[in-house]
Amino acid sequence: MLSLSTEEMACVRALRNLGALKEVSLEKLFGVCRSAMIVCPDGHQLPELYEHHAKICQGEEEPMHHPLALNGGAMLLAQESPLLIQKDGTYVPDGEVLLRHLEMAIKLKQPQAVILYAHAPCGMARTHGLTIDQQVDLLIRGKRRVREYVEPLGIRDVRAWLHICYEPDRRRTYHVERRTWESLSLTDLKGAGLCNDVTD
Ligand SMILES: [Zn+2]
């Protein structure tokens, strides 16, 4: 089982300090009882992630949370995601696959919201050498694509959440504040110890 590195921990702290990550706490329930989730199926992380999700997303109706899981989760959704390029340089259409299944899930299950997840530590992120801020960047790019895709299907609530396993018994879920994230300049990121250029 992977553990969160010192660098990853520092990155989460920096993004929280900049206001780009806000904890989704059990004290302030999301109030959505039917959701579609796009997740990484990591066998060490998904059970707790799902359990926590189900606690956060409660409403007056019977709960229904429908996970769609491919390795890397919502980091597969951005068209330019490095996770879509195989070692031999070929492109795999996993983002399109997820969107097609999401459309079917919306028709079958009528979720009120779509929640896009990345998580850390994540084997797929490590394989592709992604830092936490690069994971967040992919998550937000994926969110833009999903929003365009699901709005015609009647879904207006799309959220990007990051699940962090600090230790097996200390895990947190954070909402990525898109506006704050997009407003951060390279200087802000460098000042916070994050030096990856996230601009287009
Ligand atoms: Zn993963």
Image (cartoon, grey):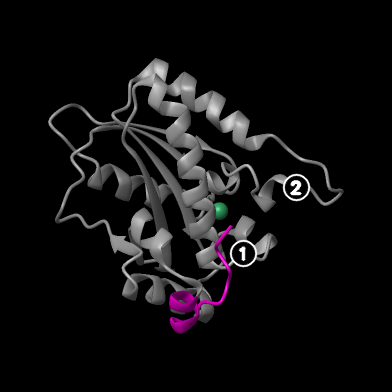
Report the residue at 24% width, 46% height from top. 55
Membership of 197 in magenta stretch: yes
Report the residue at 24% width, 47% height from top. 56
Q: Is residue 106 above or below residue 31?
A: above
| Mark nearer the N terminus (2 vs 1) | 2
Q: Position of residue 13 (x, y in %)?
A: 38, 76
Q: Secondary structure at mark 2?
A: loop
Q: Is residue 116 above or below residue 18?
A: above
Going by the numbered disc 1, the residue's amino acid type is Leu
Going by the numbered disc 2, the residue's amino acid type is Ile
> Residue 192 bears which disc, if any?
none
Q: Position of residue 184 (x, y in %)?
A: 42, 67
Q: Quadrant of residue 57?
A: top left
Q: Secondary structure at mark 1?
A: loop
Q: Give the Cα separation between the discs numbered 2 and 1.
A: 14 Å
Residue identified by numbered label 2: 85
Labels 2 & 1 near each other (Cβ < 8 A)? no
Residue identified by numbered label 1: 130
Q: Which residues are magenta?
A: 187-200
Report the residue at 52% width, 79% height from top. 7
Identify the residue at the far top of this view: 107
Nearest to the observer: residue 38 or residue 179: 179
Q: Position of residue 113 (x, y in %)?
A: 32, 34
Horizontal placement of 43 versus 13: left or right? right
Residue 32 seen by the camera: yes
